[in-house]
Amino acid sequence: MVRFLDLQKVTQKYQEEIHEAVSRVVDAGWYLQGTENQKFEEDFSNYIGSKYTIGCGNGLDALIWIYRAYIELGFMKPGDEVIVPANTYIASILALTENGLKPVLVEPRLDTLEIDEDEIERHITERTRSILIVHLYGRCAYTEKIGALCQKYHLKLVEDNAQAHGCRTQDGRRTGSIGDAAGHSFYPGKNLGALGDGGAVTTDNEELASVVRALANYGSHKKYVFKYQGRNSRLDEIQAAILDVKLKHLDEDNAARQSIAKRYIEGIKNPLVTLPVTLPQEMNVFHIFPILCERRDELQEYLKQNGVQTLIHYPIPPHQQECYQKELGGASLPITEQIHQQELSLPISQVLTNKEADEVIRLINDFK
């Protein structure tokens, strides 16, 4: 069996360091907002290249707090519009509607699966306040044209970096440090994954960081004094300690993923299968390795019958989800719909072996 993602093996890779970190927290007797959070936030900021990191409960909350903070600071108000890729995971959309903001869906490019920079400007109106780029599948979505559009129209550039920890732009910056703020997810399956839920916001803006930290702590800067109507969304000490262990190995783990991806790209030769367009290696950390196939469901079943686990990211696009029929239903997004009908994610991780990858390649090449 070639598993899609063997989390047990991923954890075992650094189990001695993880056990030591967990024991240290247990023995310390301090489990929230302590020294482990402080250290991880400092280390993550240094790694990403941002001045501030604020740990929170999960990646969705991270995005929610960014936009809530912009509303509290007066940069946005409910009813304002945010440009967002149409083929993203639903969390990107939820973060906007949670704040009363209007998501404006823009089609991706079929060759990159990322937001089409050439389609953005015609969707910008006098109510547009932000562009939310999503580094989907671990691939850098930022382009100089997107940055220029943000400057031209005075828009906040926010990154959904949930899937791209360690990824870089063409000029060498880490994703998560490119825009005005970024949301990160540490869901266990992510390239930098906790042993439970976790998330963070990164930014260079001190005022924004201060408001985000308060919002995630019931709306409070000072105990029992509440400036905002916030929520409880904090990264606990155990998860912070575990993440700090895994952060030290992130580049090594990403290199292993990139090696498997290179093997797939060079080895898969089947006219029924479309592979992702390659980028310089550092610009894609391959959280997911997506392929497109018109006979996707048949291919998935064939691989399953031959012992290979795959997943679909994602079977139903946001605008076709039941919960968004009022806001987004009826939209015509053919490229997004094609991707969601054809996308299949192959096994990829830092613990997948070359032998397992070669078996996946062999099976796909034999698929008729």
Image: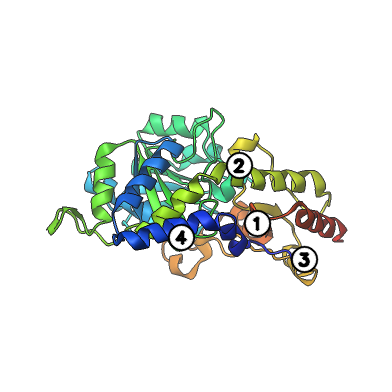
Q: SS at mark 2?
A: loop
Q: Earlier in the sequence, mark 3 or mark 2?
A: 2
The residue where tag 4 is placed is 328
Q: Are marks 4 and 1 in contact (CB under 8 Å)?
A: no
From the image, state whether disc 4 or disc 3 is nearer to you. Answer: 3
Structural distance between the alpha carbons of marks 4 and 3 = 34 Å
Amino acid at pointer 1: Gln
Point out the tag, 4 or 1, that comes first from the N-terminus.
Answer: 4
Give whichever of 40, 97 is nearer the camera.
Answer: 40
Tag nearer the camera, 4 or 2:
2
Callout 3 amino acid:
Leu
Which label is found at residue 303? 3
Q: Is label 1 in contact with label 3 (beta carbons under 8 Å)?
A: no
Residue at (49% x, 36% y) in the render: 174
Question: In screen coordinates, is 316 left or right of 347?
Answer: left
**Is 213 above or below relative to 23?**
above
